[in-house]
Amino acid sequence: MKILNRWGYRPLIECIFLIMILLLTIIEILNSNSIEKKYHITIYDMTNGWVTPDGEVVSLDQPPQGDLVLTHSLEGMDKDNKRFCMTSTDTHIRAVFDSKQTYQYIPKLSSLLGESYGMYIHMIVIPPNAEEVTLYLHSIYEFKPVCVGNLAIEDAGMFMGDLYHENLPGFVFCLLIVLFGALMLVIGFIEYGAGNRDALQFFSLGTFVVLIGVWSSNDTLILQIFTQRPELIRFIIYLCIIFVPYPPVSFIANITNRKDTALRYVMLFLVMLNFIVTMALSLLELSDIRRMLCFSHANVIIAIVILVYLLATAVRHREIDKRMLNMILIGMGAVIVGALLDIIRFQLFPSGIYTSSLYTRIGVFIFIVMVGLHLLRERRREAVERGQAELMKIMAYTDGLTELANRAAFHEREKEIADEGRACHIVQLDVNLLKQVNDVYGHAEGDRHIVSAAHAIRDSFAGIGTAYRTGGDEFIVIVEDVDGDGVAQALEGLEQAAATYNENERPPVPLQIAYGFARYQPEAMKLKEAEKLADERMYEKKKAMKAAQD
């Protein structure tokens, strides 16, 4: 926490960039290995050349609608130590070599996960001397054509390596987005712990960026490869789409000073309603999370409309910082355009092997650079200003010689006590013979005398009261929630501290501190009256001390 207060969030950002460099280094190593392998192993691309029972030649880049039965010749191909490899999305597959079925993938999922298994990687063993392969393809959803890709006959290890080679950069990009979002969340918790009312900005921004990063990572296949649970990954991705409309609305509502706007709660209601209905229908097997995706897309569009309205209203009423507005317009504009392009692409071209979020990823990257870093700079600037303000306040309310609170601080606390009507003890103190010390031994010795008295007063009342220097040789202590016996014990300690100082330091004029105290009770007197009474008792003590010396 002290490091953050001193240096801001720079160490955390630098840590993310170090992780990025490490990941990019790993990618380069994997790329090198993959390139090296390509020189030694033959690959047969199986995307084109498929024939239907009617003799029509089909390419699986753009398959026709409906179930398909496709055959491809394997004659002349070197199949030793190779697999028939492919990827698929929400498509049931049966593979038959020379009229003998050797493979099928028709997973049965729980009702909660729905029918969609997401993206899966197939590496099918090819029987010896096989001359042809027939694929029986069935799309899980009637509104989508079958979806298969990356078809090839090649070494299984090389196939997996090529998938890593192709998708790891995109996954690293998504991971960096998630790390940036996590950084925003960490900063949000730190700001919340420090009592910063703007912590919600970091929470909202961080949540939004994490959801987008996780969502877009689905396209890379890396999570599916590592977990071997494509259906679970797809389920998490769809949950991200369900919840993603709310955080940006919350973020914009916060920075435009409209945290309590009804639109924010409307968006939260729609998101939660979508989640509850989707889960309920899935559990009842009346629908599933994929079929309900259109409602998530509708919420995204509603969120965009709300964002535009909130920003337009803030601009019209000049309720947003101009620099922040520029960053938001550029960043959110990029995200909005990217999201709309991806939604349109998904609706028009659902047969693609990946549910592409390429444009959204680019938009989010622009957004986090323009808005996130600007937000960090603003918090850094505010932290510096707060630090300067606190320093100025300390300087304004601290006595430069004794480092006790000064007269201004006393008057502020005096007003607070009077306004609150809180009972307390007022202790008036005065250093005897200070003029004699200054006149005979000089002001340097006089300052030493005052500082010694101040420290003795401060230490004697430590834990029960606050000491103030209100004049050259005048001090006041405000003691709250302590009875008269506690004050008397502190004063006895003060007399002992003065005696010890005189014995150890042997000043030219012994340190003597006169004092008097009175209890302030709001119902019985005014605070000024208690101060006057304590002052009178202090002067009586001063006279008594002088008489004892004579």
Image (cartoon, rainbow, N blue to C red):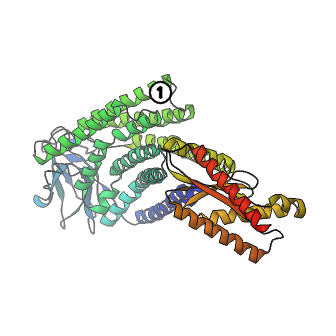
Query: Residue drawn 60% across and 45% down?
Result: 529
User: Amino acid type of disc 1?
Assistant: Ala
- Callout 1: SS: helix
Query: Residue drawn 82% across and 61% down?
Result: 446
Q: Quadrant of residue 260?
A: top left
- The number of numbered discs placed on residues in the rendered structure image is 1
Percent coordinates x, y for residue 160 in the rendering:
33, 62
Query: Residue drawn 78% across and 67% down?
Result: 549
Percent coordinates x, y for residue 95 in the rendering:
16, 56
Q: Which of these two is toward me, 548 or 463?
A: 548
Within 10 angstroms of label 1, few (less than 14), some, or many (20 or more) residues? Answer: many
Query: Residue drawn 45% across and 43% down?
Result: 201
Q: Residue furthest right?
A: 440
Q: Is residue 282 visible?
A: yes
Percent coordinates x, y for residue 415 in the rendering:
57, 42
Q: Which of these two is toward me, 181 or 130?
A: 181
Q: Quadrant of residue 267?
A: top left
Q: Residue furthest bottom?
A: 504
Q: Is residue 330 left or right of residue 288?
A: right
Residue bearing the label numbered 1 = 314
Percent coordinates x, y for residue 498 in the rendering:
70, 70
Above or below for 476 versus 245: below
Q: Which of these two is toward me, 206 or 91?
A: 206
Above or below for 423 versus 255: below
Location of the C terminus (image quadrant): bottom right
Q: Is residue 111 left or right of residue 377?
A: left
Q: Which of these two is toward me, 390 or 39?
A: 390
Q: Is residue 6 visible?
A: no
